[in-house]
Amino acid sequence: MSEIVPGQVYRSCDPRGGPMIRITAYTPGRARAHVVDDATGKRFRQILVSQLHDSPVTATGRRRRTGYVLHRTGYAINPDLNKGD
């Protein structure tokens, strides 16, 4: 598992699809991270960090069917911070 940082976006591993989530807060060593829906920034909830994965495949090579896989690395949550002056 790579480092979990605010701004990372994860997509659902469920074959039926599902929402993409964005990490809003995480304290290293804790069991849960705070997330919101990536598209809207709404629907705050907590998710177990054991459900966040780096790879869409397991160690045995099978596609994951549960949890979330890293889709995009972290960025500044405030869009104004992403602009150069």
Image: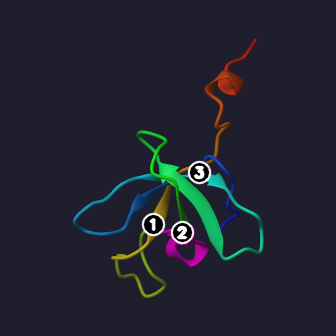
Q: Position of residue 14 (x, y in %)?
A: 30, 69
Question: Range of the magenta residues?
Answer: 47-55
Q: Residues within 10 Å of mark 1 (few under 14, many from 20)?
A: many
Q: Mark 2 touching mark 1, by CB under 8 A?
A: yes
Q: Earlier in the sequence, mark 2 or mark 1?
A: 2
**Residue 54 within the magenta-colored segment of the rendering:** yes
Q: Give me the C-alpha separation between circle 3 and circle 2.
A: 14 Å
Question: Which residue shows up at 67% across the image and 19% down it?
Answer: 83
Question: Which residue shows up at 46% across the image and 44% down it?
Answer: 42
Q: Which residue is mark 1?
A: 68
Q: Which residue is mark 2?
A: 47
**Circle number at residue 49:** none
Quadrant of res 78: top right
Q: Earlier in the sequence, mark 3 or mark 2?
A: 3
Looking at the rendered structure, the secondary structure element under dot 1 is strand
Q: How many marks?
A: 3
Looking at the rendered structure, the secondary structure element under dot 3 is loop
Check disc 3 and give the amino acid type. Gln
Check disc 1 and give the amino acid type. Tyr
Q: Which residue is mark 3?
A: 8
**Residue 51 within the magenta-colored segment of the rendering:** yes
Q: Give me the C-alpha separation between circle 3 and circle 1.
A: 11 Å
Q: Earlier in the sequence, mark 3 or mark 1?
A: 3
Q: Quadrant of the C terminus?
A: top right
Q: Position of residue 58 (x, y in %)?
A: 45, 81
